[in-house]
Amino acid sequence: MDTAWRIIDCSSLEGLITSDRGAICVHQDDGGEHRIPTADVAVVLMGPHVSFSTAVVHRLLGADVVVLFCDWRGVPEGAAYPWHEHGRVGARQLAQSQLSEPRRKNAWGRLVRAKVLGQATVLLQKDRPAAARLKEMARSVRSGDPENVEAHAARLYWSRLFASEGDFLRRPEAEDHRNSCLNYGYAVLRAHGIRAVVSAGLSPTLGLFHHGRGNMFNLVDDIIEPFRPAVDDAVLRLDPDASPAERQVKQVLVAAVQQPFRDDGATLPTVLEELAQHLGQYCEGDRARLDVPSWTGPRRES
């Protein structure tokens, strides 16, 4: 179990979790015990060998904590999240559902542009010419991304990022170490995205671009796109044989999603929450455009 960075990772825990006055208590089968205030937690990952009651889930949701339920590999396959009583949830979700096509496309184009710029930053470490090409592609993104720059950029990006390690293919269903690390990092990022979207009073199902009929989190998958390069950067710095089954590797990936994202010290979850709030205002017509931040690399301590 790891409790650092406001993530409680119980995906490989064998034990019991109970609720106790503003906190949850983790009892490991080997005798270890931990008491964690729910106010210090953002996300909890539950594995198949953890026992807990509905009181625990109630306590976590009451503290705005997202709970992810993981399979034996530690890969999330379901989630519980709080239903925020946002002051304008009805008006905001109505505006979200009625967002005009030009404004929807404009917002998606800005998300794609920011994502590709972030990918260019990551790729600078491995292939400067390819990174320069990605920057050019980012500048060419138009409203709605009609040329599908996102897909073309992804093809170039993934073909060069791990080129020295053979023929890498980015496939979420793959079980190699690189894909597994990416999946784990993205799952933690997605949990923060769920939290941000629900906190903003938006419907996580109504996406700007993603529209999977069986996907409850289309909008979440939209707004986390510009933040994925932060995870990619962390995975790139790991040893090729690093696995998310290792505690130290999980710590690195969780830290990647909690690190400062801007020069003012604002962390990635904070910036993600701001983006979700701005999107809500954009849907209601209170913002003329959606300003989307892009990943510009790890912040150095002064």
Image: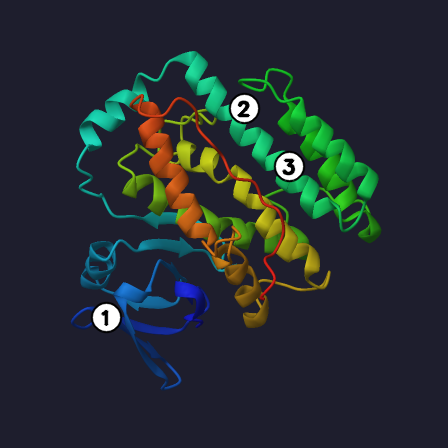
Report the colour scheme: rainbow
- Residue at (34, 37) in percent of width and height: 277
The kind of secondary structure element at disc 1 is strand
Crowding around mark 1 (Cα neighbors within 10 Å: few <14, some 14 to 19, many 20+) is some
Mark 3 or mark 2, which is nearer the start of the sequence? 2
Q: Position of residue 235 (x, y in %)?
A: 65, 56
User: Which mark is on residue 23?
Assistant: 1
Q: CA distance from mark 1 to mark 2?
A: 42 Å
Say which amino acid is labelled 2: Gly
- Please state which amino acid type lies under the numbered disc 3: Leu
Circle 3 or circle 1, nearest the eye: 3
Q: Distance from label 3 to label 1 (Cα)?
A: 40 Å
Which residue lies at the image location 42% right of the left edge and 51% below the top edge? 269
Q: Is residue 87 left or right of residue 114?
A: left
Towards the viewer: 54 or 184: 184
Kindly report which numbered mark, 1 or 2, lies closer to the viewer in this rendering: 2
Q: Which label sits on residue 117?
A: 3
Disc 2: which residue = 109
Residue lying furthest top in this view?
Answer: 101
Q: Amino acid at mark 1?
A: Ala
Location of the C terminus (image quadrant): bottom right
Q: Secondary structure at mark 2?
A: helix
Report the disc number at residue 112. none
Instruction: Measuring from the top left, give residue 26's x and y in whole percent.
Output: 32, 75
Left or right: where does residue 142 sit relative to residue 285? Answer: right
**x then y, percent, for residue 218:** 42, 32
Q: Secondary structure at mark 3?
A: helix
Q: Which image quadrant for residue 60?
A: bottom left
Q: Residue at x 31, y 66 (%)?
A: 40
